């Protein structure tokens, strides 16, 4: 519904010749009061507002990105990333809401006490809205901790099916996967899954290389990809589907990298199982053929695979098999990211930390790839704003419409940008996107109608709206 702003004073009005309102492009003035969009009118409508902004013609007005997969790491590993730097990076990239993963912080978010420590760390520092995932590990199954975290407002529960890389967050066995999903099904909690099969990983490590002329590990990227073959993802996703079928629960597959699992996913959805799937900007941007040996800034698990695989992921996004795109921002110090290498810019894939730092660049990276393939900007917004908001159950996020949160982004989609890692806002200067040429510039980000930036007041800490717990 379109309304003209009334005579009441407003905090902000943003005018744009192209605004994505209720999923459609139009000229608009978007009026904001008390953090919400209260009216959408014509471009030149009279609106009494404290701040009146008209975007130049090369900029469009978009809803803020909702990034449902971010590792902030505070408390405990704040030298890797903290809420101050992560949320500034988010705002610089047009991200107005993040949902923080339960690891690699210490303690991990597997109890209500640990959740409160996270909230205490995030509250004073965050310039975008922040929600939290809980964690499902062997030690908190059947203890009441999962229900307690659910009632405290977490958006769901992260589980690994293979070793996570940190000792304080152990993985679930297949039997424990079924146990966790059955426990969550009682209160309709969402299980979000790092889907790699440990037996497949062990088998890949023990088997001789199919290409003996190539090195078997260390600096060789080809060897790293062979150590985490497609079958590892596909088998783990089959286990998730089996658990859904047995329990009637809900599950979300994180960071899908292998297109060989798409038929399994399509069949599960056709069966009516409650399964959603994400992929990440790095799987849509890079390919194994162009990653050099020692380039451990590209190391992530599951790995970036080949160019043909990448194109199948794009097709699966377009046809709806993959539901959303989220950054999986997983930073570390530069020393950990290039560990084991001969110098500060080359690492050993066997020992370097696995994770891509891309929070600030995720939306622009996906838009760049979409633009190259003739996919419209509104589709990218659907995957990274409206879709992720729906995944976590935040109906006032990810859209511009009356009643929605005034999370707005002024975006110049045709502006080319060459990325310099030293210009980015996340804590440690390392990213796979260094020197990449992307399209799109974020000119301004408003969170709840307030311009985001280092001097902005703290944003909100979010809980699931159905909890009754105040944000």
Image: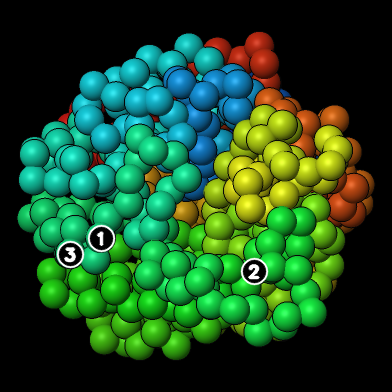
Q: Nearer the viewer, residue 468 or 310?
A: 310
Q: Nearer the viewer, residue 438 or 56?
A: 438
The answer to whether residue 294 is left or right of residue 109 is right
Q: How many marks?
A: 3
Distance between the Cα atoms at labels 3 and 1?
5 Å
The answer to whether residue 142 is left or right of residue 462 is left
Q: Secondary structure at mark 3?
A: helix
Sequence-wise, which precedes: disc 3 or disc 2? Answer: 3
Sequence-wise, which precedes: disc 2 or disc 1? Answer: 1
* Above or below for 105 versus 419: above
The answer to whether residue 342 is left or right of residue 280 is right
In the rendered image, the quadrant that contains the C terminus is top left
Residue at 50 percent across and 29 percent down: it is 73
Q: Which residue is mark 1?
A: 173
Contact? badges 3 and 1 (CB < 8 Å): yes
> How far across and how far down the image is residue 285, in percent?
74, 63
Q: Which residue is mark 3?
A: 175
């Amino acid at each position: 519904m379109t309304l003209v702003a009334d005579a009441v004073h407003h905090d902000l009005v943003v005018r744009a010749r192209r605004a994505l309102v209720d999923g459609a492009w139009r000229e608009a003035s978007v009026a904001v009061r008390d953090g919400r969009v209260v009216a959408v009118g014509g471009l030149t409508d009279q609106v009494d507002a404290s701040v009146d902004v008209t975007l130049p013609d090369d900029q469009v007005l978009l809803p803020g990105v909702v990034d449902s997969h971010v590792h902030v790491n505070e408390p405990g590993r704040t030298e890797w990333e903290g809420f101050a730097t992560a949320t500034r990076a988010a705002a610089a990239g047009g991200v107005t809401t993040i949902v923080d993963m339960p690891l690699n912080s210490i303690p991990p978010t597997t109890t209500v006490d640990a959740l409160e420590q996270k909230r205490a760390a995030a509250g004073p520092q965050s310039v975008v809205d922040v929600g939290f995932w809980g964690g499902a590990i062997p030690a908190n199954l059947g203890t009441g901790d999962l229900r307690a975290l659910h009632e405290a407002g977490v958006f769901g529960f992260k589980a690994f099916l293979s070793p996570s890389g940190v000792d304080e967050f152990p993985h679930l066995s297949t039997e424990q996967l079924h146990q966790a999903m059955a426990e969550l099904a009682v209160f309709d909690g969402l299980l979000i899954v790092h889907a790699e099969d440990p037996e497949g990983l062990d088998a890949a490590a023990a088997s001789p290389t199919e290409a003996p002329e190539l090195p078997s590990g260390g600096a060789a990227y080809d060897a790293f990809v062979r150590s985490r073959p497609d079958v590892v993802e596909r088998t783990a996703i089959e286990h998730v589907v089996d658990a859904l079928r047995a329990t009637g629960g809900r599950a979300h597959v994180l960071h899908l990298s292998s297109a060989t699992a798409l038929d399994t996913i399509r069949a599960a959805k056709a069966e009516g199982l409650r399964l959603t799937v994400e992929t990440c900007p790095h799987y849509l941007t890079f390919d194994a053929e162009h990653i050099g040996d020692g380039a451990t800034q590209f190391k992530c698990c599951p790995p970036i695979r080949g160019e043909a695989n990448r194109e199948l992921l794009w097709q699966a996004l377009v046809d709806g098999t993959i539901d959303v795109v989220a950054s999986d921002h997983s930073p570390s110090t530069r020393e950990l990211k290039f560990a084991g290498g001969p110098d500060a810019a080359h690492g050993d894939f066997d020992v370097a930390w696995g994770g891509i730092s891309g929070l600030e660049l995720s939306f622009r990276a996906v838009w760049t790839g979409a633009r190259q393939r003739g996919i419209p900007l509104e589709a990218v917004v659907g995957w990274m704003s409206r879709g992720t908001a729906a995944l976590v159950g935040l109906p006032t996020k990810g859209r511009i419409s009356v009643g929605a949160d005034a999370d707005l982004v002024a975006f110049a989609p045709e502006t080319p940008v060459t990325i310099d890692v030293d210009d980015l806002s996340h804590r440690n200067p390392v990213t796979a996107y260094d020197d990449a040429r992307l399209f799109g510039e974020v000119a301004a980000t408003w969170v709840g109608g307030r311009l985001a930036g280092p001097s902005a007041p703290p944003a909100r800490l979010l809980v699931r709206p159905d909890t009754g717990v105040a944000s």
